[in-house]
Structure formats: structure tokens, C-alpha cells
């Protein structure tokens, strides 16, 4: 049984929490069990995690401060690593943000803005088409996820946008 | 027999054409462009020609006059268009003929007739191929569209007359949607095909997409090579195909094949072609369109017939007779093709760009991989997102599914996100496995777009924690840039 430092991996997708305790950098405990695992750098450049006789190809896609996006078998998982205290604070902040009512519509993929169908101050309903984004030769309609008033539009026609760029801000009703 | 071929395409299809042509002893020429001077397809050909410097307004593989000049200057006998780009461009085929270059494909008149969806419908009607109701001419404005839609009843589909490949189509369910959708369809038709004309058709809810491969020589012989099932689609883009289709019995297959062959005969088709049908739950089928080129999914037909379709194209273009009769064509076993695309399935199939760092390909006697990339290749926004095609052949459908799943588990790509986890999820899906899926499959039957192996989430959590405590960040994907905070921390630890 370990009495070391606690860290919690908090999932950005489903809020799942995995709590790890460790004594030093190498002894990881999960649910009071010492974990035996290997991180193997293969000769051909792949990284594998070997645990309980099974090997999983893994890849770190990105790290932003304490948030990691990791591919396991090509499936993406995003976790932020928190201490018990920082997790508590994070959950509290997230709870407050939900009530603020401003919703940012972000670009789901990089592409070119073809047409904007709304104006600032306009009232929109859920499912209304806000703008049209062309990516990989396909035209994609970006729709309002909620009803509200268009607060601001940060792009114009023919703009090239990157993934996750804020396109429109909607004030939720 | 043709002695030299200029491949006016890139990527995996250029490699695919070169493979067969070289085996047949034909000299193959590839075209190097500035966008990818080190592309893999260039090592698949015998000779490389540099595309001349232009103002870049027209994409290289759409630049008809420069491509023809390349063929003429190098005294190349024939051109193969592959799929996409100029593959169904009647003007290109016509220019080739005028310049005395053999075009590996049907005559320009046939491409023209079938490429114009309205004309194609008229021809299909003439040889009594069943069809969905709608307009037999292009629709000029929203008012006319509304009138037609009222007549056949919603939902309707607006299609680009010059369309194909799943682009330039919009489904309209209510009259209120019609104006926006009409505008979208015409503007997309204009930008994608240079022709804004569209037509309206009754929209069949959740059909199956079944296509028949036909092949015809210049001596009047027409043979069909069975069907392909292409119902696993997202936004009309095929993601996974198989041959034969689990929905067809011998009787229905014979009926649909008869219609496909009749259509090919009616237009005096010559070369390889595909007749696409929609099939409803009651076994009624309707003509959709005819593709006058080789298809992306042709390998599944090759797997079950044992024929090389590119070879057939070349032999037909050389004036030879078909090497097989209808009786000699037999369909053996089952084949599945998975399109491995550089797409982030979990973010709505958004393109995933970057460099292919590493690749592990599955191997086996029943496995074929068609690809135009290798380790170090870059996935750029210039081209479509297909990285590779995985084709698996089995004795039965069940065996093919199990072998495909096995192969997908051995298929790893590092550096970009791919559709591999999606294909796994399809292989394990109950509705896919029992064969009753239709084109709504992805939206209605898939709970998760990716298959998660046991414990994956836990492994990810563990790994994230491990790297956090070790403060080393071997970030490998080029999707991300180095965060200044990380950089600072790294410098501190030097």
C-alpha cells in the first residue's frame, strides 16, 4: 500500500477519473495495486505499452500544459493530469462556466469560409445554418447548436480558418 | 498492343495502373508536380516527366492542354486517366482523339452522355431500366424546383447534372429548406464541375447502394463482373465496400445485371464501366448513374473474379477482344475493401494532416494493400484524404470479416489519425455483420464511430500520468506546435 502522491487523470471526453498513486517516478499504484507495465520503443519507431501480456501501440499527439492527447490503437483520448486540489478547482470552474450562456461555435476542421448566412444581432434557432465551410472539396454547413442571439462573427467570406478557430459567438437564451 | 502509357493521375491509382502496365511490358510515364515532387507514385513508373511551370490557376492533373503536350512531346501512345481529375471529362477524351493519343476509357460521346446525369436518365429510360421519379431536364430556379418537389413529394434530392462521386448533392426534406439547399447545390455544382445546372429526383430513404461492374470491348461483347455493395457511406462518400452484396440472391443479381448490360449495349459502351443502382428493402432497384472510369473500389471485384481490371482496360483500348465470356466469369468467395483515410473520426471525420512517421502494414496471402504513400509522406490539404486501401479476400463473408478485422488490428499508422478504428467498429457491428445495413448505417446503427479495445482508456490515462511525472514530452504528431510553456520547461531541464 502506497502513501505517496496522488494524481488523477481526468478525461476531457467523458469526465472519467483514473486515480494513480506513486512513490517515486517508477512505482505506480492503481486501486492499491502496483502496476507492472513497460513502455517499449520499437526499432521501427513505434511506441508500445506492454501491460499484463498485451501490447498497445500508443502515440502522444499533443501536450498543452497538463493536458495530453494520446492515441491508443489509433483512438484518441484526452486527459488532463490533476492533483486532488486542482481537479476540485477545475470542476468548480467548469460548473460556473456552464451558466455564463455564451457559446462559441468553432471550426470543426480546417477550411475556407464560403458564405456567412447570419448577421450580428440576429436571432437564431437551434439547427439554423450559420455559415458554410469548405474543406477537402466538400461544403459543410455549420449549424447553431442552440438558440440565441449572434453576439459576434469573427470571420468573413473567403477566410481560411484552422481547426477550432472561433467562428461565431452566440449568446444563449 | 499499346506500347507506352502516360498516367495522368497521382497517388495510389497511379501506382496501381503502373503495376499492371509494367507487368504487361508497357512503358509507363508519370508526371511530377511541384506540390509533391517526391511522391511514391513516381517510383512506380518507368519514366518521370516534369509538369511545366504554369500560373497554377488550373490544377496540374486538370490541365488538359499541358497534359496532352506532355504526351505528344514524348511520343506516348496512350493516356490513362485513373479516377477523379480528368477521368470523366469528355473534352479531354475528345482532345486526345484529335491529337491521335489513345484514351484508355470509353469514347468522348459516351462520357458526355453518361456524365450528363439528365442525358443518362433519358438513355436509361429508353432501355427500360427502372428509375425514380423527378425531372428529366435541368431545373432553372427555386420556384420550378418547388413545383417539381410538390409533384413527386418530399423528400427530394437535388443533384448536379455534371456531378458524380457523391458530390453536388443535397437532400431536401421540407419546402422551407429548399431555397438554401438549392443555392448550395448550384454553387457547389458550379465550383466543383463548372456547370451550375441541377435536377431534382425523388429521394429514396435509406436504400442500399449497389453497383455493377460491366466491361465491353470494341467487338460488341459486353460482360458483367458482378456487383459491389457500397452502402457504408458518410455524406455520400463511400468508406467501405464489398463484393458480392449480401442483399442479392441469384435471381435479383441476374435481373440487375441484365439492366446494367442493356444500358452498356444501348450506348455502345467500350471499356470498363460501373452502373450504380439504389436498392430498396423490397428488392426494387433504380438506376442512379453510370461511371465511365475505373472505380476506387475495383479491387474487390478483382479479388472475387481473379481478373485484372486495368489490364482489361488496356487490352480493350488496344482493340483486343474480351479474354472472358459471361459464362467464364465466376464469383469466388467474398472481398472487403476498407478505405484508410487520414481523417479524425472522433472529430466528425475532419481531415488529419501531418507526416506519416511510421507505418505497419498487415500481411498475408489474402491481403492486398493499394497505397500511394510511405513513411515520411506528407498528408497535405492539396489532395483527398485517402492513405491506403486494405482489401481482404475470404471464402465466405464471415471469413472475410474476421480476416479484415485481424488485418486492421495489425495496421498501424503513426503521425496522423486514420479511419482504422472506424473500420474496426464497422466489422464488429451487428447490423453490418448480418448484412441488413443501408446507406443510413453510419448515422443510425453505429453507437460509436471508433472501436475501442478493452482497457484503451485506462492505458491512455496511465500514459498521460506517466509522461506528466517524467516531464519528457516526445510529442510526435506534427498536428501540434510546441507550447512555449513546454519549451521553457524543457530548457530548464537541459
Image (spheres, rainbow, N blue to C red):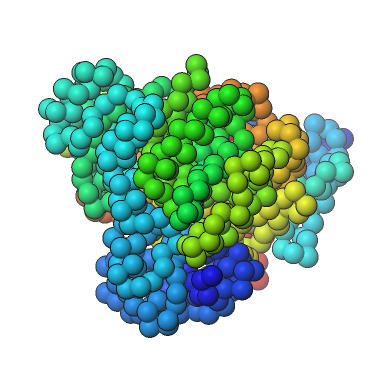
Q: Is residue B180 above or below residue B43?
A: above
Can residue B153 be seen here? yes
Please, is residue B223 above or below residue B71 in the view?
above
Q: Quadrant of the N terminus of chain A?
A: top right
Residue at the (47%, 59%) spot, across then down: B82
Residue B446 point in image, percent of width and height: 56, 27
Q: Position of residue B407 (x, y in %)?
A: 72, 46
Residue furthest to the front: B219
Q: Toward which corner of the image does residue B374 lie, by quadrant?
A: bottom right
In this view of the protein, which residue sits in the foreground, B472 or B340?
B340
Q: Nearer the viewer, residue B417 or A94?
A: B417
> Looking at the image, how many numbered discs can be counted on the residues?
0
Residue B201, placed above or below residue B281: below
Residue B137, given in percent of the width and then of the height, sits at 20, 35
Q: Is any part of residue A135 visible from this angle? A: no
Side of B481 relative to B330 (left or right): left
Residue located 47% across and 44% down the image: B274
- The quadrant where residue B103 appears: bottom left
Image quadrant assignment for residue B57: bottom left
- Quadrant placement of the C terminus of chain A: top left
In x, y percent, where is residue B245?
Answer: 59, 32
* Residue at the image position 37 percent from the left and 41 percent from the top: B266
Amino acid at each position: 500500500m502506497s502513501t505517496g502522491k496522488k494524481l488523477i487523470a481526468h478525461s476531457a471526453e467523458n469526465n472519467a477519473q483514473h486515480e494513480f498513486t506513486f512513490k517515486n517516478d517508477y512505482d505506480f499504484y492503481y486501486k492499491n495495486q502496483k502496476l507492472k507495465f513497460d513502455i517499449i520503443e520499437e526499432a521501427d519507431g513505434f511506441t508500445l505499452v506492454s501491460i499484463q501480456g498485451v501490447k498497445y501501440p500508443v502515440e502522444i499527439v499533443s501536450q498543452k500544459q497538463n493536458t495530453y492527447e494520446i492515441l491508443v490503437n489509433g483512438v484518441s483520448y484526452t486527459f488532463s493530469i490533476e492533483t486532488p486540489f486542482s481537479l476540485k478547482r477545475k470542476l468548480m470552474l467548469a460548473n460556473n462556466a456552464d451558466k455564463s450562456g455564451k457559446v462559441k461555435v468553432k471550426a470543426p476542421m480546417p477550411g475556407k469560409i464560403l458564405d456567412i448566412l447570419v448577421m450580428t444581432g440576429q436571432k437564431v434557432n437551434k439547427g439554423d445554418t450559420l455559415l458554410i465551410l469548405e474543406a477537402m472539396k466538400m461544403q459543410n454547413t455549420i449549424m447553431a447548436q442552440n438558440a440565441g442571439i449572434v453576439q459576434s462573427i469573427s470571420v468573413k467570406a473567403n477566410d481560411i480558418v484552422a481547426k477550432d478557430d472561433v467562428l461565431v459567438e452566440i449568446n444563449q437564451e | 498492343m499499346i506500347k507506352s502509357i502516360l498516367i495522368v493521375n497521382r497517388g495510389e491509382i497511379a501506382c496501381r495502373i503502373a503495376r499492371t502496365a509494367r507487368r504487361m511490358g508497357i512503358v509507363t510515364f508519370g508526371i511530377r508536380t511541384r506540390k509533391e515532387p517526391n511522391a511514391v507514385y513516381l517510383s512506380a513508373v518507368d519514366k518521370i516527366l516534369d509538369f511545366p511551370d504554369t500560373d497554377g490557376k488550373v490544377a496540374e492533373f486538370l490541365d488538359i492542354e499541358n497534359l496532352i503536350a506532355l504526351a505528344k512531346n514524348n511520343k506516348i501512345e496512350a493516356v490513362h486517366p485513373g479516377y477523379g481529375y480528368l477521368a470523366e471529362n469528355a473534352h479531354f477524351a475528345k482532345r486526345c482523339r484529335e491529337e491521335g493519343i489513345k484514351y484508355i476509357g470509353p469514347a468522348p460521346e459516351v462520357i458526355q452522355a453518361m456524365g450528363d446525369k439528365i442525358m443518362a436518365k433519358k438513355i436509361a429510360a429508353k432501355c427500360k431500366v427502372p428509375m425514380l421519379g423527378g425531372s428529366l431536364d435541368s431545373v432553372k430556379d427555386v420556384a420550378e424546383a418547388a413545383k417539381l418537389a410538390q409533384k413527386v413529394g418530399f423528400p427530394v434530392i437535388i443533384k448536379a447534372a455534371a456531378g458524380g462521386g457523391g458530390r453536388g448533392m443535397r437532400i431536401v426534406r421540407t419546402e422551407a429548406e429548399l431555397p438554401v439547399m438549392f443555392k448550395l447545390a448550384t454553387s457547389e455544382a458550379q465550383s466543383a464541375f463548372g456547370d451550375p445546372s441541377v435536377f431534382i429526383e425523388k429521394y429514396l430513404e435509406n436504400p442500399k447502394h449497389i453497383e455493377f461492374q460491366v466491361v465491353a470491348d470494341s467487338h460488341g461483347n459486353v460482360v458483367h463482373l458482378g456487383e459491389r455493395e457500397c452502402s457504408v457511406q458518410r455524406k455520400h462518400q463511400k468508406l467501405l465496400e464489398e463484393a458480392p452484396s449480401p442483399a442479392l440472391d441469384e435471381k435479383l443479381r441476374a435481373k440487375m445485371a441484365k439492366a446494367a448490360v442493356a444500358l452498356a449495349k444501348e450506348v455502345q459502351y467500350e471499356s470498363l464501366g460501373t452502373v450504380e443502382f439504389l436498392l430498396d428493402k423490397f428488392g426494387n432497384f433504380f438506376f442512379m448513374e453510370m461511371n465511365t472510369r475505373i472505380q476506387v473500389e475495383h479491387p474487390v471485384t478483382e479479388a472475387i473474379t481473379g481478373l485484372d481490371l486495368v489490364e482489361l482496360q488496356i487490352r480493350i483500348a488496344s482493340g483486343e477482344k474480351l479474354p472472358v465470356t459471361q459464362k467464364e466469369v465466376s464469383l469466388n468467395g467474398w472481398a472487403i475493401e476498407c478505405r484508410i483515410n487520414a481523417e479524425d473520426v472522433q472529430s466528425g471525420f475532419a481531415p488529419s494532416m501531418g507526416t506519416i512517421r511510421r507505418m505497419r502494414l498487415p500481411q498475408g496471402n489474402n491481403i492486398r494493400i493499394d497505397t500511394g504513400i510511405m513513411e515520411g509522406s506528407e498528408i497535405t490539404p492539396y489532395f483527398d484524404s485517402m492513405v491506403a486501401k486494405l482489401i481482404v479476400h475470404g471464402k465466405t463473408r464471415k471469413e472475410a470479416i474476421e480476416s479484415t478485422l485481424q488485418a486492421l488490428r495489425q495496421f498501424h499508422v503513426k503521425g496522423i489519425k486514420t479511419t482504422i478504428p472506424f473500420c474496426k467498429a464497422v466489422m464488429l457491428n451487428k447490423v453490418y455483420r448480418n448484412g441488413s445495413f443501408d446507406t443510413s448505417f453510419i448515422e443510425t446503427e453505429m453507437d460509436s464511430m471508433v472501436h475501442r479495445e478493452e482497457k484503451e482508456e485506462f492505458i491512455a490515462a496511465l500514459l498521460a500520468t506517466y509522461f506528466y511525472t517524467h516531464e519528457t514530452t516526445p510529442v510526435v504528431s506534427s498536428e501540434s506546435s510546441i507550447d512555449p510553456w513546454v519549451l521553457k520547461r524543457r530548457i530548464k531541464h537541459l
